[in-house]
Image (cartoon, rainbow, N blue to C red):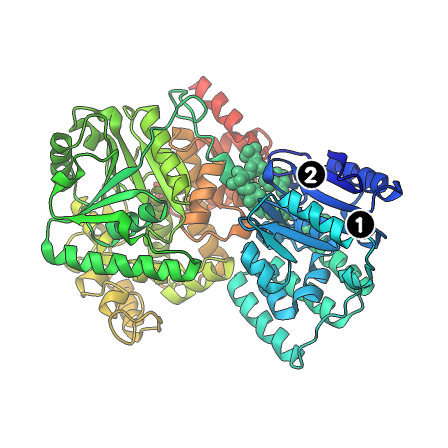
Amino acid sequence: MAQYTRVSGVVGLITLQNPPVNALSAVVRQGIVDKVETALSDPKVKSVVICGQNGNFCGGADIKEFGTKMFGPPLIPMIHSIEAANKPVVAAIEGSALGGGLELALGCHYRIAHSKARLGLPEVTLGLLPAAGGSQRLPRLIGVPAALNLITTGRHVTAAEALQLGIVDQVTDHNTVDAAVKFALSVAGRSLDARRISTYPCPRPSDLDALFEEVMQKVRQSARGAIAPVACVQAVRAAATLPYTQGMEREKELMATLFTSGQARAMQYIFFAQRAVGRWRMPSGASWDTSKPRPVTKAAVIGLGTMGRGIAVALARAGLSVVAVETQEKQLLEAKQAMSSMLERGAKRRGGVPALGLISYSQSIQAAADVDLVIEAVFEDMALKIEVFKQLTAVCKPGTLLCTNTSGLDVDQLASETPNPELVVGMHFFAPAHVMNLLEVVYGPRSSPQAVATAMQLGKKMGKASVAVGNCSGFVGNRMLKLYLEQASFLLEEGATPELVDRALEEFGFPMGVFRMSDLSGLDVGWRVRKAAGLAEPGEASGPSARIRKGYRYSPIGDLVCEQGRFGQKTGRGWYQYEKPGSRVARSDPWMHSFLEQYRARHGLVARSIDHQEVLERCLYSLINEGFRILEDGIAAGPEDIDVIYVFGYGWPRHRGGPMFYASMVGLAKVLERLEHYHQAHPDVPNLQPCSLLRRLVASGSPPVHMWREVRKKLHSQL
Ligand code: 3H9
């Protein structure tokens, strides 16, 4: 709702009240309409200020109302009547003015922002466009290029940038409402003819067509199949080329297309899923609301390889004191230099001062004696990690949390080597750790809820989507990825090329197909794991047993590629070839094609034609099937956890909502039928066998994602 008071005798103050972000729900819109009318019809009132309660202007339209029946006054005429008012209306912006919130402010005649406020039109990140006039008013106010940048990326700008762009008229460090009231008093009675943005002509750069062509090309490339960014460009083009009322019509048409698209649903689902994963729950019943995190002000990172460096930088950026430990002197010096430049580059990009002084460096693990939490990031080797944990137990003060950065080792085994296993959790960071926004917090059966709460809070502080998951080989993300990689190798055996598989996945929306991604991360890592697991055998064996391990189908192709010293980009050769080691542009490699032909001939395999549909079904449905198994095992608490992990850590296209949401969009019955089909065709691949939870969900009428937990509960109670 909205509250109305009169201040200084002549200023009508309207305060939006809808915690926590003052979203423009039906009741709030009705409140604004009513209070604006009150203010305008009161002869004593000479000007109006609109603000939000609790230091927050407005987070935009109420996303929870999307997809439900529309009640209350619509936004567009509400904003129009504010703009058309014959008394000055001033927006007092504190906290955030986002989406419909900024559109409301653009309908006001003046905007005053607090220096810490953030403004933006992030609709594109929800699969939409600013459709309450934002796509038409912003280009008129700040010009086409700047508006295109803000609207197609959805980025938030600081008050200082908003002032520079001309979005706000004044920035204050003091009480924003007081400043706005003072300002409103000063402009009372002034003509408003020049303050109504919808009446401004849109500034038209001379090279308008070339500008739009260039932007459209860029946007299509980075959108990877998402339609909202393209619609945003079309809407701004309408602002630049059509009169305001026709532009508004175009905005409405484009919004209608987006609104009913599955993409908008998927992206809004991810918005809420990202917040839902913060409300974690362990199988023991312990949860976010009953477990208090410990304060962490000083942390240590042990091991300054690529991961350790990124983790230490992310911690320092979050404002923690960091002790960075590396026993090798040369490595320590290199790390110090690299981390300093990472911090400096980051500060240059984001503004602010690099947090160089927050990191101290040491060659001795003793330096971790007084920290609150340690993240061990040494080489992925259990014996080495156990040794480090033993040393840490002897050195650290009692109660220090011990976290291991591992992408798949058994966190519980490590915990059992310490006298206080309840203080141990896994923190699976993704490379580069100071850039990637995902963290899997892995709890073992003995991890205390407080340890999990602390790691989750620390992840949030570092700005990462943090997901609490159970302990199993590969946790959630890598456990699912294994099956995706396996199917990709089988497809090569059956006749596909790396190019064909990658093209299908990139057209689906992944930034990189599976083979290009493997070349980037390095093929030797997986090879080492397969050798340790007794799967990779040396030499080019032939005969039926060469492609079978433990009774099931196995593809040794990846092992053979590694035997050639082809480890991906770093060696200049992998599934593709590169100009030189370290180069990034993948080129087709005739060697690979003849290697695959020889491989098939040696194993008596006849290449068949494989289409994109099969690539997608085999790679994605097998990964999804494992997701259902993970839910069944209770390793992830709900489908949202899996989807957030895949969108934030594995390049799953956001507009497809994560693998589990995607399965629900495709139809669970269809996923089940295709898995059954492929399992019949490949009975030696047990992972293609649909899991019981998927069968149960289909038998229950394929309920929507938010109801899957109930079905799983029932399944468990019957086991
Ligand atoms: C739009 O405006 C369309 C128009 O152009 C045209 C229409 C015709 N609605 O993020 P937090 C909830 S589209 C409903 O943890 P923070 C959120 O789910 C909208 N609920 O806080 C969470 O609930 P819970 C364009 C919303 O301080 C709680 O508020 N606007 C909305 O870290 C706290 O959220 C946007 O895209 C909403 N609009 O960050 C802005 N916003 O506690 C979206 C939040 O139950 N919002 N909630 O989990 C944000 O980016 C952040 O929430 C914000 C605060 C920066 C505002």
**Mark sitting earlier along the chain (1/2):** 2
Image x and y of residue 584, in percent: 33, 69
Q: Residue at the spot x=11%, y=35% of the render? A: 391
Q: Which SS class for mark 2?
A: helix
Residue 604 shows in the view:
no
Q: Is mark 1 within 8 Å of ligand 1?
A: no
Q: Residue at the spot x=50%, y=21% of the render? A: 714
Q: Quadrant of ligand 1?
A: top right
Say which of 420 and 136 sits in front. 136
Q: Is mark 2 within 8 Å of ligand 1?
A: yes
Task: Rate crowding at label 2 as few (under 14), some (14 to 19) or many (20 or more) other CA atoms within 10 Å.
Answer: few
Quarter that holds the N terminus: top right
Tag 1: amino acid:
Ile
Disc 1/disc 2 C-alpha distance (Å): 23 Å
Image x and y of residue 538, in percent: 14, 56
Query: What residue does disc 1 label?
Result: 82
Say which of 586 and 392 sits in front. 392
Tag 2: amino acid:
Glu
Q: Residue at the spot x=16%, y=24% of the render? A: 419
Image x and y of residue 270, in percent: 53, 44
Judged left or right of residue 494, residue 180 is: right
Residue furthest to the top: 717
Whether residues under marks 1 and 2 lie with C-beta atoms below 8 angstroms apart, the answer is no
Quadrant of the rendered structure where residue 567 is?
bottom left
Query: What residue does disc 2 label?
Result: 65
Q: Is residue 533 above or below residue 135?
A: above
Residue furthest to the bottom: 206
